[in-house]
Image: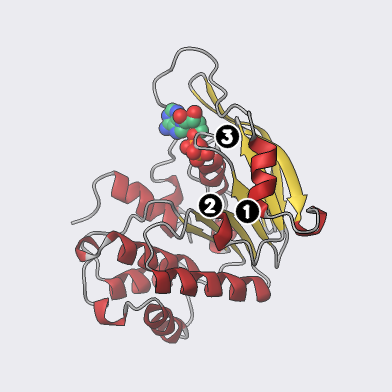
Amino acid sequence: MLLVENVTKRYGRTLANDGVCMSVASGELAVLIGPNGAGKSTIIKSICGLLRFDGRITVGGFDNRTPDAKRILGYVPEFPSLYPMLTVDEHMEFIARAYRLGEGWRGRAEDMLARFELSDKRTKLGKELSKGMQQKVSVCCALLPEPKAVILDEPLVGLDPRGIRELKNALAELKAAGAALLVSTHMLESVEENWDLTYIMVGGRISRTFRRSELQAGESLEAAYFAATEGAGTSSEGGAAAPADSGMQNGAAASADGGIQNDMQNDAQGGGRS
Ligand code: ADP
């Protein structure tokens, strides 16, 4: 469902991703772990169509920059970026319209908001929500269109215990329903029950890949991670720091159907709407 082939991304002289190859099949939960600066957010942003890169990424067989790919891909960014002047309900409606969802979305939205204890926040503006509440709305926005592939970048950070439990349950349900999930997290215990496949990234490369069945009996994900990263460097600096080149495709994603998460992120970075 998700296929990343030989993706290389440079920020000036910094080689953030170096020939990255990954794949996540339908019904699989893949974990992406690695030290800070390893290149995890970069590959995630590339998959989600937010960065230019060399190589090829497909979602459900569609090039990741096409509307067909964006329609079936959900993205929960590391930092939620809601529209400050839209209410929670309006975020749901915005997503529903952008993805041209059938009428059933209202019931699903209500259920999701209740699940994440947001029912009494439906008329609150994005800017009036706490960080954790924004994260929950961001999750609801990503899941409302019933994506076939979902990328989550440190999704549990900022959530309260109930939010963590509900998101873990939601991920298990998505997986059971056949979605391909890619979760980047440092909270290894949060995925310990559900992961199928792990990619360890170090210095912009995938340094080790293993399936749950390949771990030695009793070996935890955490132990495997430390074994793979012990003494490994974290960066691929190619010389003096060059000016940051975010490579953001501002506006490009917004023009494509279903690119709403990207649109929201770009918009927020541009100061949001008012
Ligand atoms: P991770 O998510 O694993 O912590 P990142 O993908 O954020 O790692 O960063 C990988 C490398 O790319 C780091 O060396 C980081 O400093 C660099 N980097 C990330 N974003 C930018 C940017 N916009 N401009 C320049 N360098 C960047």
Q: Secondary structure at mark 1?
A: strand
In the visual, does 53 lie left or right of 105?
Answer: right
Q: Amino acid at mark 1?
A: Val
- The image shows residue 8, relative to residue 179, as above or below, that is above
Q: Amino acid at mark 2?
A: Thr
Q: Are marks 3 and 1 in contact (CB under 8 Å)?
A: no
Looking at the picture, tell me which residue is in the foreground, 193 or 204: 193
Question: Residue tagged by mark 2?
Answer: 185
Report the residue at 62% width, 34% height from top. Answer: 202
Q: Secondary structure at mark 2?
A: loop
Query: Is the residue at mark 1 in contact range of ligand 1, meaning its CB lies under 8 Å from it?
Result: no
Q: Nearer the viewer, mark 3 or mark 1?
A: 1
Q: Quadrant of the C terminus?
A: bottom left
Q: Are marks 1 and 2 in contact (CB under 8 Å)?
A: yes
Q: Is residue 9 visible?
A: yes
Question: Residue tagged by mark 1?
Answer: 31
Question: Residue tagged by mark 3?
Answer: 53
Residue density around tag 1, few if under 14, some if 14–19, many if 20 or more, within 10 Å: many
Q: Position of residue 182 (x, y in %)?
A: 60, 56
